[in-house]
Image (cartoon, grey):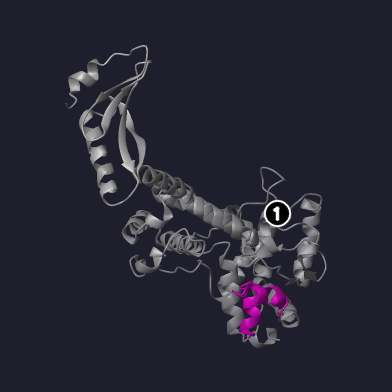
């Protein structure tokens, strides 16, 4: 006789556990504590087995019968329901361990030691802010292209197309790592090529004409102390203000290396050290800075604490106070000025690129070539500093005089 909902509800505990039998192997076991468990009894390979189907009333009579019928279908196909359940549990545990976030953090931990600290920080923040909240808990092998595209378009909708493309690239690296380590069958990012709006590349704003550069140099000269020296330093070294600000105050030789206070390898995107020739004018700036910051940790310390470098925004703020709007000149714009004018003057383009630290994509080659074109760069950087002096003083100059 089949069970009824009323019989299940009214079943009371007894001194010993007992069963209320339904049909086709299903029964309700009532414990002495009063708890009620659904059980399914079946025979497989001539052996009697039992599996639990849940607790009443969380699992109703109708739901218990559905679970029983599903188990009976497995039996009809020659599958042991108990073993099938164990395998499903193992798969679920593996899936939980192989979520996108778990695999991404494993990939990050493996590769980030070879990256610049700033580069690795950006990647991790991008994943934590824009990717993990949406697909981080999903098994990486189950993520399909449309699901990933929805996440990337969420980033794109903020107007940050470049970030969406970078996130797409990072996700592709994670998926390929998952494929290589047996956690996924394929990389779905390959199917999303062309799905995002193209990135419109904007160059950092900067003045372009020699007369405008001269006016900029005179404006910088009107400032005093560390704030004046920071943009002046950027203009003579062809470095971004972010890299210059974190320099240490040790280097006063004619060549600036990591050992003499220059830019350490971990600050560079390629992870390779960068050697920088110093002009006489740059060395003079170093001597002047020694009076202000020579006993501290950084050449350009933060205005709030000497234990941190000056923010790149500080240089931009100084330029704003000099009268240059953000669409006219930025801290990064000093590199654009030098690149434009040095190329116009006929200097070796490869030497200019090396001075700008546009290194080799090949990490091994970059490690050997970090000092490449050094003699030519030494001449070029002295000529560049002399040229800036001429522009600042509004003296007439023929560009060819400043070539090598």
From the top left corner, tell me how far across and down residue 114 is, in percent.
Answer: 64, 62
Q: Residue at the spot x=39%, y=61% of the render? A: 161
The answer to which image quadrant residue 280 occupies is: bottom right
Residue ID at (65%, 51%): 310
Residue 16 sits in which quadrant?
top left
Tag 1 secondary structure: loop
Q: Decide if residue 306 is on the left or right side of residue 35.
A: right
Whether residue 316 is visible to the viewer of this picture, yes or no, is: no
For the residue pair 102 and 156, the one nearer the viewer reads as 102
Residue 110, quarter of the rendered image: bottom right
Asked whether 365 falls inside the magenta stretch, the response is: yes
Q: Residues within 10 Å of mark 1 (few under 14, many from 20)?
A: many
Q: Which residues are magenta?
A: 347-372
The image quadrant where one finds the N terminus is top left
Q: Quadrant of the C terminus?
A: bottom right
Q: Residue at the far top: name it.
A: 15
Residue that numbered label 1 is attached to: 300
């Amino acid at each position: 006789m089949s069970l009824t909902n009323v019989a299940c509800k009214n079943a009371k505990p007894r001194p010993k556990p007992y069963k209320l039998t339904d049909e086709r192997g299903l029964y309700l076991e009532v414990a002495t504590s009063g708890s009620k468990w659904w059980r399914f009894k079946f025979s497989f390979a001539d052996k009697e087995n039992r599996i639990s189907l849940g607790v009443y009333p969380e699992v109703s009579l109708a739901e218990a019968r559905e679970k029983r019928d599903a188990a009976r279908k497995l039996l009809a196909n020659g599958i042991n329901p108990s073993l099938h359940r164990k395998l499903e549990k193992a798969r679920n545990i593996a899936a939980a361990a192989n979520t996108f976030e778990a695999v991404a953090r494993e990939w990050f931990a493996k590769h980030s030691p070879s990256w610049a600290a700033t580069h690795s920080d950006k990647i991790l923040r991008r994943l934590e802010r824009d990717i993990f909240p949406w697909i981080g808990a999903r098994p990486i092998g189950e993520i399909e292209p449309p699901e990933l595209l929805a996440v990337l378009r969420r980033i794109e909708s903020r107007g940050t197309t470049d970030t969406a493309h970078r996130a797409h690239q990072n996700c592709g690296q994670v998926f390929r790592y998952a494929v290589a380590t047996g956690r996924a069958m394929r990389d779905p990012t390959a199917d999303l090529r062309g799905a995002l709006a193209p990135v419109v590349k904007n160059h950092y704003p900067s003045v372009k004409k020699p007369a405008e550069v001269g006016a900029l140099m005179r404006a910088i000269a009107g400032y005093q102390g560390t704030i004046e020296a920071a943009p002046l330093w950027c203009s003579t070294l062809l470095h971004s203000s972010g890299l210059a600000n974190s320099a240490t105050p040790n280097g006063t030789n004619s060549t600036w290396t990591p050992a003499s206070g220059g830019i350490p390898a971990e600050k560079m995107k390629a992870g390779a050290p960068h050697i920088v020739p110093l002009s006489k004018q740059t060395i003079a700036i170093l001597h002047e800075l020694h009076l202000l910051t020579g006993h501290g940790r950084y050449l350009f310390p933060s205005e709030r604490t000497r234990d941190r470098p000056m923010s790149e925004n500080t240089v931009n703020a100084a330029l704003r106070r000099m009268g240059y709007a953000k669409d006219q000149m930025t801290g990064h714009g000093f590199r654009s000025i030098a690149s434009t004018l040095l190329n116009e003057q006929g200097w070796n383009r490869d030497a200019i690129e090396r001075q700008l630290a546009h290194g080799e994509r090949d990490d091994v080659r970059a490690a050997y070539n970090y000092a490449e074109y050094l003699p030519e760069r030494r001449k070029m950087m002295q000529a560049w500093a002399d040229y800036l002096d001429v522009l600042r003083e509004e003296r007439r100059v023929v560009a060819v005089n400043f070539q090598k």
